[in-house]
């Protein structure tokens, strides 16, 4: 078991703990991570998911190179699809998934981080898509998600350069949302998770869906999707509670 799960106050912290390999991912760990996240999504006691790495060196240092050495084209296809399944589980989660990037986020680790809805990084975090240095390309969504997050030019530079960038450069280009000292990273990520928990869970889920779906639609199609989701919330218990609480000048109670 390389995946640890801790639940407190509706926040689940998922930690990849394979420190001897800088938390690198093999097929078994990918399956374990996927099932853990799916379990969190279906658990009504959990409102926000945080993914981080054990130790102070690595978030996820990528896919296990020793595994990839022995793959043929068919095996590589299966491994790539497994990685993509994990990143799709994260991205499609109706519950916010936050990445607390506490060190190296390289290759598949960077791809897992960019599938998360928000990325907070420690000051020692390093990001890269170094696959071209191995005679490969990103296979878990890097060529698709990275341009949507940092823009085509920045993504192209990172993918075809294969070089690492530090946390502050990641912040500058929009790859990281915020940067914190290592010893404050998890606390600050939890603080943001608690901020989310004060908001309507259905509204948060619908917001995530509209944001994600916009990538595959024109602006007009996306606007139509948005206004339909906006209107359908009216009359629900959650929206009634939010509007009434505002008028009554009290804090809304969405989760009880």
Image (cartoon, rainbow, N blue to C red):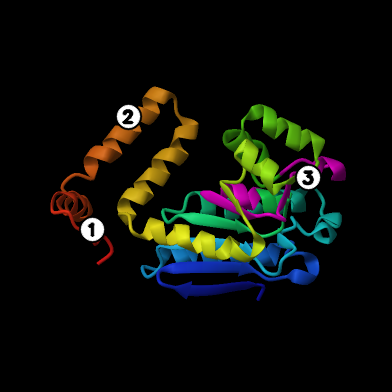
Q: Is residue 202 above or below residue 231?
A: below
Q: Residue at x 72, y 61 (%)?
A: 58
| The C terminus lies in quadrant | bottom left
Residue behind mark 3: 164
CA gap, disc 3 and disc 1 = 44 Å
Q: Could one spot residue 192 in this view of the protein?
A: yes
Q: Between residues 194 and 231, which one lies in front from this camera angle?
A: 194
Do callouts 3 and 1 mark residues in contact (Cβ within 8 Å)?
Answer: no
Q: Is residue 199 magenta?
A: no
For discs 2 and 1, the disc positioned in front in the rendered view: 1
Residue behind mark 1: 252
| Label 1 Cα neighbours within 10 Å, binned few <14 / some 14-19 / many ≥20 | many
Residue range corresponding to the magenta coloring = 111-138
Asked if residue 154 lies left or right of residue 68, the reply is left
| Label 3 Cα neighbours within 10 Å, binned few <14 / some 14-19 / many ≥20 | some
Residue behind mark 2: 224
Give whichever of discs 2 and 1 has the lower sequence position: 2
| The N terminus lies in quadrant | bottom right
Give whichever of discs 3 and 1 has the lower sequence position: 3
Mark 2: which secondary structure? helix
Q: Position of residue 175 (x, y in %)?
A: 62, 42
Q: Position of residue 49 (x, y in %)?
A: 49, 62
Do callouts 2 and 1 mark residues in contact (Cβ within 8 Å)?
Answer: no
Q: Residue at x 75, y 57 (%)?
A: 61
Q: Residue at x 13, y 54 (%)?
A: 248
Q: Position of residue 23 (x, y in %)?
A: 72, 65
Asked if residue 145 lies left or right of residue 244, the reply is right
Q: In terms of image quadrants, where is residue 102? A: bottom right
CA gap, disc 3 and disc 2 = 39 Å
Q: Is residue 204 above or below residue 210?
A: below
Do callouts 3 and 2 mark residues in contact (Cβ within 8 Å)?
Answer: no
């Amino acid at each position: 078991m390389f995946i640890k799960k801790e639940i407190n106050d509706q926040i689940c912290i998922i930690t990849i703990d394979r420190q001897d390999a800088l938390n690198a991912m093999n097929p078994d760990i990918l399956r374990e991570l996927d099932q853990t996240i799916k379990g969190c999504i279906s658990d009504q006691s959990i409102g926000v998911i945080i993914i981080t790495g054990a130790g102070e060196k690595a978030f996820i240092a990528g896919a296990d190179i020793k595994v990839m050495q022995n793959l043929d084209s068919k095996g590589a296809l299966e491994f790539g699809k497994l990685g993509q399944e994990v990143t799709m589980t994260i991205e499609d989660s109706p519950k916010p998934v936050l990445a607390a990037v506490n060190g190296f986020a390289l290759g598949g680790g960077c791809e897992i981080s960019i599938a998360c809805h928000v990325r907070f990084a420690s000051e020692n975090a390093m990001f890269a898509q170094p696959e071209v240095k191995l005679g490969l390309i990103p296979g878990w969504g890097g060529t698709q998600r990275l341009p949507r997050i940092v823009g085509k030019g920045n993504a192209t530079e990172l993918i075809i350069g294969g070089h690492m960038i530090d946390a502050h450069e990641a912040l500058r280009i929009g790859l990281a949302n915020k940067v914190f000292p290592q010893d404050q990273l998890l606390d600050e990520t939890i603080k943001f998770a608690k901020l989310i928990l004060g908001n309507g869970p259905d509204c948060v889920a619908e917001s995530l869906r509209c944001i994600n779906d916009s990538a595959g639609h024109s602006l007009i199609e996306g606007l139509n999707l948005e206004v339909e989701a906006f209107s359908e919330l009216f009359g629900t218990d959650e929206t009634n509670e939010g509007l009434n609480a505002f008028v009554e000048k009290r804090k809304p109670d969405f989760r009880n």
